[in-house]
Amino acid sequence: MRPYLHRSFKWPTTPCLHHLPSAKRFKTSLSPRLPSFSLQHTNSNPRHSATTVLHPPLSILPPSPSIPQIKQAHAHIIALGLSRHRSIVCHLLVACAISPSPSPEYAYAIFNCIEHPNVFSRNNMIRCYAKGGTPSQSLALYADMRRNNVCPNKHTFPFVLQACSKVSTIADGVQIHAHVVKLGFVEDVYVRNALIHFYCAFRELDDSRRVFDESSEQRDVVSWNAILAGYARDGKMDVCEELFDEMPERDAVSWSTMTLGYVVGGKLEKGLELIREMRDKGIAPNEATLVTVLSASAQLGLLENGRWIHSTIKALNFPMTVPLRTALIDMYAKCGCIELSRQLFHEMPQKDVFVWNAMICGLAIHGLGAEAVKLFQRFTHEGLRPMNVTFVGVLSACSHAGLVSEGRRYFESMMEDYGIEPEMEHYGCMVDLLGRAGFVSEALQLIEKMTVPPDPVIWGTLLGSCRVHGLVDLGETIGRKLIEMDPTHDGHYVSLASIYARSRKWEDVIKIRRLMVDRGANKVAGWSLIEAQGRVHRFVVGDRTHERSREIYEMLEEIGRQLAVAGYSPDVSGVLHDIGEEEKENAVREHSERLAIAFGLMVTGVGGLIRVVKNLRVCGDCHEVSKMISKLFGREIVVRDGSRFHHFKDGECSCFDYW
Ligand code: ZN
Ligand code: ZN
């Protein structure tokens, strides 16, 4: 028996998404189209336009220059003796404002050189602060502008409102809204879009909608996209659908926002449908959407969907960015194609820490502990600094492969060499690693020393170890504690009862079962998925709802016959209910993964690979049977269970029965 709870690797953890934290995902697609002060444009202030002839150091800068490039141009300007030239200095500030990662300190140093800065320079400085990490400075600068009687123009407000959407309270923005009305900028479409965006950022959808509805003439596709994203982020997809239908014009952002809304809201299929439509129309989804769809496919283990997205990326000639490639590596690893992940990883010219995380975690879930450890060593040799997710990967790799001393060493190193405080997931990996290898008291000591209060999952892991190693007294103490901590989880009762059963304390077994029924503990429903014939087929235990159910059960019979010939007898110790032996056998036989495998045998061609995804850990009997099926039917079977991959081939499993 193995622990029924796990944290050693949580499937939904998608390391690559650290590139795009959830709040940013929608923002990526809806950043308001602010009026751009391109370097190629002349000064928007007509009084200056006559004098605006860009000098070479500035005119050769790219459209979105980096700070080092700007500094280089600045050095040229100084060398040419032009550092006091007002127009040139103003344009240097513009360059800072349009830089993808502006440095507000540097920009302010330039701003400070401008005598009596006009509204144009002030706007650019406000923009730098709004884009950089100091939005409150934008507001301070705006207040200063008002005090100095410099009148804001229509370009001022989008930047100020952008800053307002990043500060902690809504009050400042509401005040700015009042200024917008008072100074008569309310009809400007850029200002309106910024207001819609601002209220959405604070989840004030009603206010946002009011601005949107106020003037239907003053709307463009950006206004529609902004309100759409507001509702999508709140999961109100029904409203989004109405808006999407009404939209006079849709662009890639509108489509991407809808797709993201569906996928983040758990409707992957609908999201994929939209991507299909986009592909047909030749519209490319944005990067955030592709990454999100890939990670949703990865979480569910839907290889065919993931592959299809990969082919779409190629078909659309979409640039293969680092986040996208990371998402692909993660998807292939989580869908069982670790060799494709490896290939994508090795082909990658430049790797950031997220790519390494995805690859290390991927190897870990495939039980390739030694390879994961080696990769981690290479990672540190290349001078990269691991982060907490990296260690979750390394420690779970050690735990899946039983590398006890390595695990201990990395856990120490994480704290001592890198100053990373262990979190619940790291402790979980360690308890799992130590407990499974038989170092139960060491695992217990670790739990007692934890800097965060241990959660039921950690105790459940240790209880599992007690069960494996027959530690009745400790198991009993932990089991009782768990039932108090988490009374609705049936797994704790089952574990405790089986510990009693092992030590033949039958009365206690009955007491615990009764307690479970009295408290109405919920069984976590197990399910298995298999992709076949362009569809996802989902099975639960004893499922008879599938349209080919009759054939599936015939296949199960056939499997049963062949297994019996091969001398198999079922292990029903995992079934703990008040039912007879024969019923127990049936219950095991109809576990969801068996139905999925039987269906897989029916629908894949001779010798074809069968891939199954299960939400819980696979039970001992199903594991044994899967091994036998792989041999008897000459099939490779890949099962992704609640914590790792099992590759069944020729009667063996890649986990060597250690899971
Ligand atoms: Zn089973
Ligand atoms: Zn296995």
Image: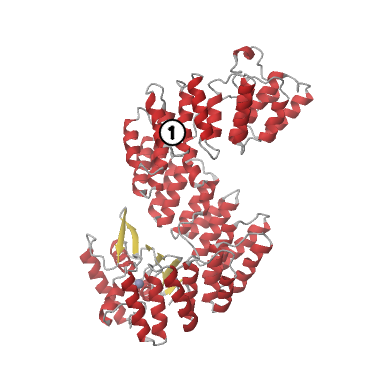
Instruction: Tell me where residue 19 appears, x and y as whole percent.
Output: 54, 47
Instruction: Tell me where residue 557 appears, x and y as whole percent.
Output: 24, 74
359 to 503, vertically: above or below: above
- Residue visible at 32% across and 52% down in the picture: 534
347 to 591, vertically: above or below: above
Instruction: Tell me where residue 405 appears, x and y as whole percent.
Output: 62, 73
Q: Which sits in the foreground, 142 or 76?
A: 142
- Residue visible at 39% across and 88% down in the picture: 504
Q: Secondary structure at mark 1?
A: helix
Rendering quadrant holding ligand 1:
bottom left
Say if residue 336 shows up in the picture. yes
- Quarter of the picture containing the N terminus is bottom left
Residue behind mark 1: 226
Question: Is 516 positioned to the left or the right of 287 in the image?
Answer: left
Q: Amino acid at mark 1?
A: Ala
Say if residue 4 shows up in the picture. no
425 to 55, vertically: above or below: below
- Residue visible at 53% across and 75% down in the picture: 435
Instruction: Tell me where residue 336 appears, x and y as whole percent.
Output: 44, 60
